[in-house]
Amino acid sequence: MAPVAGPSYFPPLDKCLSGECSLISWETAYDVILDHEGARQSAVLKSFLSDDTSVEILRQPWDPFQQPSTQSKSSFETKTAAIHVTPSENGHYNINEIKEDALWLSKETKIDEVAALRITILEWQGRPTAQLRSGFTEEEAISIQDVAGASTLGASTFMPKSSLLAAPQKVSSQDAIPFSSLEQRRLRLLQLYLSERLHILKVGEAVIVTAMADEKDVASGASNDETVVPSWIRELGRALIEFHATDSSTAKKPSFLSHGVRALQVRLDNLDNGSGWCSAEAGNLEVEDVWAQNQITETVLIMRLLFIHIDAPSGFASSAVILAWYRFIHKYDFFSNFQPTNPSQQELVPLLQSLMAIISLCLLKLPQALEQLTTDSVDRSSSYVLDLQCTNELNTIFIEAASQGAVTASLALFAWSIIAQTLRGVVSDGRAERNQLVAGPEFMEDGSSNREAPRQLSIQGTAARLNRLEEVLEAITDTPLEEDPIEFMANSAVNGSRVYEVIAALSETLASSSDTVMDHDIGLLQIFCWPL
């Protein structure tokens, strides 16, 4: 069910068209959030982001707009009805044109009609600024120069060498089309739609990172000065974190992470299939390139959101989530050969690969996994490590990645080999203890008497747990490889995929990024300083 747009998110249409209310774009909201002083003083931004519709959008940022429905069409008709907005007598706006554009946008992008109407009003309100930024066509510039007297005005005291009236430059075929034409107007609508999607993800990330940073400050005793980041942004971020944390992982309601993996798959499927806009009324290759760039950028932003949630101090992700992620990246060979269709999109590939690598590592929760293997736990559902089906499929994926020498898989591959080696050590110790107990408690291996020895497995846990660990180890080692599979994966990660070089390159890639997620703690990479 599409949420009813609140008054702060989408005021009454007549107030928007009369100029009484100006809509806030998600790009504007993001820009103000980054300016902490501006955010602290902006009651308008607070009202906008606190609106129920905005909160609902931020709860599912990768799918922010509902699909068209009977209810959304009815809401659209009500919002644009003559009783609520009358045609402009002075030609200030054309309500029929606005409605037609909104319905067209809804059809092309498959979003509900009210969401499309809001984007259409945003475009209408932003036309003066957009036109100034677009400059003038050659004919318009010459016409202005003829009227104003370019030779005199251009050398005036107030406008020396005015760039506004400078000699006209060549323009592209799209620029030559009149600004107010149907084609240009709808091209701007598509571009604004893409911008809104992108900045919803950015706003969601910004408020969540702010809340997490605040929690770190509290834990460390650092000051969280209200004059730096307003408390309401922190509260919004915490509310989103809490919602996502309690967003059940049951089959009836997939978790935040499950939704994220599906969203990534949708973006990559979209890249394969194209936007479908090139055959549309306002479609052209230029907007197709912008659309493709948006898909890759959204993919990066979604990965950043996933990383933030996965790296938060919490328990293991479910086996279903872990398998969904690894099946996804396995399908694309850990993005080792990912090539965008447009060379201009290539610059995002290293960041995409870096995020994929660190998410794959974080999901394994290496320190926690090792702790669970070496402590007395019989809860089979507590971790993917004790899930036979999960470990079996993960191992198959890692063996294949090791065989292919996938550099982008090296971090997770090395972590998995550490887990497997630790598991083998635990099982070996447990078997030795079990064999000793079977032989009898009265004599130790060195022949000395030990009448007080317990008649059960001690530190390694119960017999049932050891049996489970043996099953998992057998699944990992039962492969077609002639050599030891655990050593094979470790050697492949270190020598074939050059994991230590990857760590250095990854740190450089993340450190060189100015994106907010790169401020997040990635100290877990230090675990690879351990000897295998």
Image (spheres, rainbow, N blue to C red):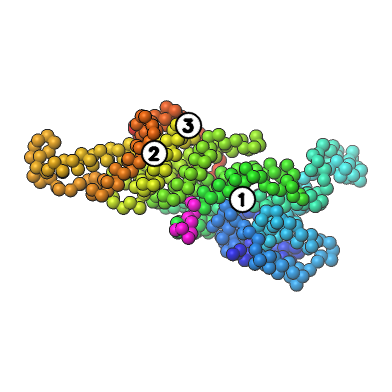
For the point 74% across and 47% down, the residue is: 279
- Mark 3 sits on what residue? 404
Look at the image and say whether residue 251 sits in the magenta stretch.
yes
User: Residue 109, how many percent across, how many down?
Assistant: 67, 53
The answer to whether any part of residue 241 appears in the image is no
Check disc 3 and report its element: helix, strand or loop. helix
Task: Please say whether residue 302 is visible from this viewpoint.
Answer: yes
Q: Mark 1 sits on what residue? A: 199
Quarter of the figure with the N terminus: bottom right
Left or right, 347 with reference to 511: right
- For marks 3 and 2, give the CA distance: 16 Å
The spot of residue 114 in percent (x, y) is 67, 62
Give the alpha-carbon distance from disc 1 to disc 3, as whole Å.
Answer: 37 Å
Q: Which residue lies under the disc numbered 2?
A: 416
Q: Determine which quarter of the picture holds residue 486.
A: top left
Tag nearer the camera, 1 or 2: 2
Residue situated in front as seen by the camera: 468 or 294: 468
Considering only vertical position in the picture, is 73 above or below 502? below
Q: Label 1 is placed on what type of residue?
A: His
Q: CA distance from mark 1 to mark 2?
A: 36 Å
Q: Earlier in the sequence, mark 1 or mark 2?
A: 1
Residue in the picture at 28% in, 37% down: 425
Q: Is residue 363 above or below residue 236?
A: above
Number of other residues with Cα within 10 Å of mark 2, as a class: few under 14, some 14 to 19, many 20 or more: many
Numbered range of the magenta stretch: 250-258
Q: Is residue 142 left or right of residue 55?
A: right
Query: Which of 488 and 295 lies nearest the eye of the viewer?
Result: 488
